[in-house]
Image (spheres, rainbow, N blue to C red):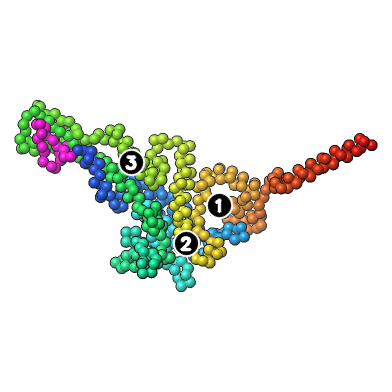
Amino acid sequence: MLFSSKKSLNVNNEIYTGSQNWFNTMFNSDISSKITEDTAIKTSEVYTCIKVLADDIAKYPISVKQKTNNKLTTEHTHPVHICLNKQPNKNMTPFVWKRLMIFHMMLYGNAYNVIMRNNKGEVTEILPLSPLTTSKQYDRDNAKYVYFTTLNGKHYKIDTDDVLHFLELSFDGHVGLSPIEVIRENLATNIGGNKHQAKFYQKSAIPRGILKTTEIVSPENKKKLREAWYEVNNEEDVAIMDAGLDFSTITIPQKDAQFIESMKFNKLQIAGIYKVPPHKIGELDRATFSNIEQQSLQYVINTILPIVTNFEQECNVKLLNIVDETENRYCKFNLEAELRGDSESRAKMYETMQRIGAYNINDILDLEDMPLLEDELGDMHFGNLNLVPLDIMREYQLSKAKGSKSDSKGGDNQNAD
């Protein structure tokens, strides 16, 4: 914008059309005080990071497993497995529910659910609660933590055993810290830069600047000059200046290298706080096929795995009961395919693990979510005939050595005869 709405100042015969310093206007830290979770999600960087995490985690199935007699099975008929894999509640699919949980965690720092149970104590539904109206507080009367929430205008007090609570990094282990609090200043810079660009193009890319003249210009003429300048630029016409008028811009150039680098730097910082690789948010400046593949694996190990571990442990504590615990049941995400890489790498790994006897055929089929073999062949472990236990190898070598000595003595006796 060339002229601000504030009164123009005639300083040293210059018609000043700006207000404060453009840098302070665009990157004013006061913007950060206005940044909330609702405004943050409207920035492309935050939206992209959260969507990447939410979609990536929501696609992984979470199952109830049971380990008995060294045999691992999936409990398809368990109430918790049904909730987590078929329908957490009447209004959501498992994918939608998991994605909502990540969205709440990464934006507000907390994701709350109330656990509904039947008369037998079995989990029937997992209902999400709004992080804006739900809180965890210490109940001094009963010396324990409880949850308070507001639903349809009514206030509820809920016991901790009935709330499934996933939280981000926390100061006290009870309430998660919103990542937006951490990246508030970075968001302020990016939002300020985006607003600057929007204003620049909303005004048909009219630059803010100064019209200089050596003559004294009356207020009426200043007004006419301002109107004429807008009229000319809005019609994308050619500006014709009277003798003695000179225009110089005071806006930051849209293609200025420092401007672009500062925006990119903040974008990478925001991605770094969410632990999302640059190529996941479209930053491919230094990307190659080999390092993207490596980054993807590190992303699963360092970003996805901690989040799903958080999920698994909370589900184990809140959704499974004492009987499940004694019978070795637990909740588990299936990340095996992602951790092992592509199909060729998995095939080589399976071949190696089966050859050394670590996996049987059913183990491999289960990891690939394929039907298991029902006969005993599927549970048999095979090994290489060239491999023997070390103690047997030692005994064999000792016996072989003794045999060699005996043969040697026998030969000496025969020679003596």
Q: Earlier in the sequence, mark 3 or mark 1?
A: 3
Q: Quadrant of residue 366?
A: bottom right
Mark 1–mark 2 CB contact (< 8 Å)? no
Residue 7 lies in magenta, yes or no?
yes
Q: Tell me the kind of residue under disc 1.
A: Leu
Q: Nearer the viewer, residue 417 or 221?
A: 417
Q: Nearer the viewer, residue 208 or 90?
A: 208
Left or right for 273, reference 253 = right
Q: Nearer the viewer, residue 136 or 380?
A: 136
Q: Secondary structure at mark 2?
A: helix
- The residue lying at 46 percent from left, 46 percent from top is 302
Residues shaded magenta:
1-20
- Residue matched to label 2: 317
Q: Secondary structure at mark 1?
A: helix
Say which quadrant the N terminus sits in. Answer: top left
Q: Tell me the kind of residue under disc 2.
A: Val
Q: Tell me the kind of residue under disc 3.
A: Asn
Left or right for 69, reference 280 = right
- Residue matched to label 1: 367
**Number of other residues with Cα within 10 Å of mark 3, as a class: few under 14, some 14 to 19, many 20 or more:** some
Residue 140, image x, y percentages = 36, 67
Left or right for 392, reference 355 = right
Image: 70 above or below 193: below
Mark 2 vs mark 3, foreground winner is 2
Image: 76 above or below 204: below
Say which quadrant the C terminus sits in. Answer: top right
Residue 28 lies in magenta, yes or no?
no
